[in-house]
Image (cartoon, grey):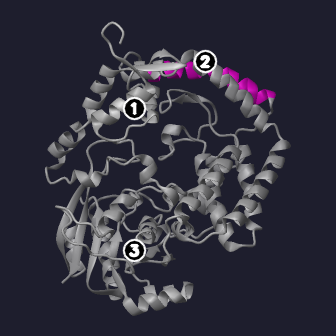
Amino acid sequence: MANGVELLDIKRASEWASRYLNKNVTASNVAYLIQYGRVKKYGSNSNTLVKKQELIEYYKSYNGRRERLWKNQLGNDLNWALSFDNYKEAETTKHVHRLHPYKGKFIPQLVEYFFDSHTDKFKRDTCFKKGDIVLDPFCGSGTALVQANELGMHAIGLDISTFNSLISNVKVGKHDLSKLHDEIKIITVKLKRFLADCHIVEFENKLLAKLFEFNNKYFPSPEYKYKVKNGMMDSFKYGAEKAKQFLPIFLELVREYDIQVKNGKINSFLDKWYLKNVRDEIDFVFELVKKIKDEKIKEVISVILSRTIRSCRATTHADLATLKEPVTQTYYCAKHGKICKPLFSILNWWERYSVDTINRFRQFERIKTDTCQICLTGDARRIDIFEALKKKNEDFNKIASKQKIKGIFSSPPYVGLINYHEQHAYAYDLFGYKRQDDLEIGPLFKGQGKEARESYIQGIADVLNNCKRFLIKDSDIFLVANDKYGMYPFIAKKADMEIVKQYKRPVLNRTEKDKSAYAETIFHLKAK
């Protein structure tokens, strides 16, 4: 207590906040608030303190307030329990769910809510049990498949994208982690030798030291972010001035170490969005990956490489999800509130994601069940599921042919929102997979006009009509969608189904910059 103001250290602040909010608030959670300027830092670096009153004001500003505001905008039928706002990011991206980024995926807790055996005031009946087979005809990155495994269910996924199928099957596959570790180590050693022949590591270390010194002077943390958060300074004007001030330092280092920043040619996505040295490293590692004899190991390492190069695109941190223009020099980063740089080497991310991948497989192994999951590559409007399954996994096909599929849980693409192949253009470029953009249902490039919506309605209905052939009678179909155009009643009619129930949930954790109130509906359908 100082001058009537109660100051708390990080540990005491987390304990107090846990009691105040009636949920676990870690010291890291409090440190995050300080780091990003939500509350002001007091004391010294060795004894960081916060004001209890500032924490109260911060928590009051959002605790329950967002729920009230969103219900005012979206309606009182909004099921806030399905927001899963009490889960930390580490829980919504648990184990293999974060093996690779993917736009538009639902969180595992949503799948689990409808798969497991619990009931509540919204979910009155259970539709699935252990041993059932569930189908996701828009498999994406395999969230439904992974959760089916956790809960002791079999699952089949369908996806038009070869790369999506790769991600999904790697997640649910069985892997020799010792062998995987050895293969990764071989590639890492060779990559480091490759880098030893150039000056890129030395250049980056020198650049990082200069940035550290400059940012500490002109963007002191957390004071700078606190001032920006509270409207005490124009961050973009100030940031632009300081970026211009630092640029000569960067250019001098580029000359000193003879760094080639730009590619001489721009014939592909990889040429356009990667600096010269990064592009060379990608090609070097990919040549090593192609020589791996074990196909399962090769697939896992391909996913690690893809995740790595996604993080190394020459763009600002704020524009990583939606690329604008290539960045080839230092810049003011609105996301981090300081001067940042593009990536000049893949080594750091390659090592980080390699370790992370193995750790996530180990975490998943502890809870995996002895059930079957697979993602089949094909057009869900036409594919013969059991015939395709027979070619990939005859044992699983025998189970599926005998008991058929219990139901569907899927999140179809939203009309005119995402180009599903284009979001992984770097992977298609590198691995040479065939793109089938023309077979996507409701892609961004077709827009959201009347023709696009009619095509979307027909496409989703065609998928349902095709998949019905492989379902048991009285099956349950759950589709997660933001139906702002009211298309799903028409889809249900074309598929000769009826919507028996709807669950409206708020979507809190979106990758897009638009953080306005947003909801999606889980439609429960049954065949007539």
Q: Which residue is mark 2?
A: 245
At label 2, counting other C-alpha atoms closer than 10 Å, the crowd grade (few under 14, some 14-19, many 20 or more) is few
Q: Nearer the viewer, mark 2 or mark 1?
A: 1
- Left or right relative to 422: residue 272: right
Q: Is residue 123 above or below residue 210?
A: below
Viewer-side residue, 436 vs 285:
285
Q: Amino acid at mark 2?
A: Gln
Q: Which mark is residue 269?
A: none
Classify mark 1: helix, strand or loop: helix
Decide: marks 3, 1 in contact (CB < 8 A)?
A: no
Q: Amino acid at mark 3?
A: Pro
Task: Residue at 71% x, 26% y: name it.
Answer: 251
Q: How many marks?
A: 3
Task: Residue at 52% x, 88% y: name it.
Answer: 395
* Magenta-colored span: 235-256
Tell me which label, 3 or 1, sits earlier in the chain.
1
The answer to which image quadrant residue 256 occupies is top right
In the rendered image, the residue lying farthest to the top is 3
Decide: marks 3, 2 in contact (CB < 8 A)?
A: no
Quadrant of the frame with the C terminus = bottom left
Q: Is residue 415 visible?
A: no
Quadrant of the frame with the N terminus = top left
Please provide percent x and percent y for residue 291: 77, 68
Q: Which residue is mark 3?
A: 137
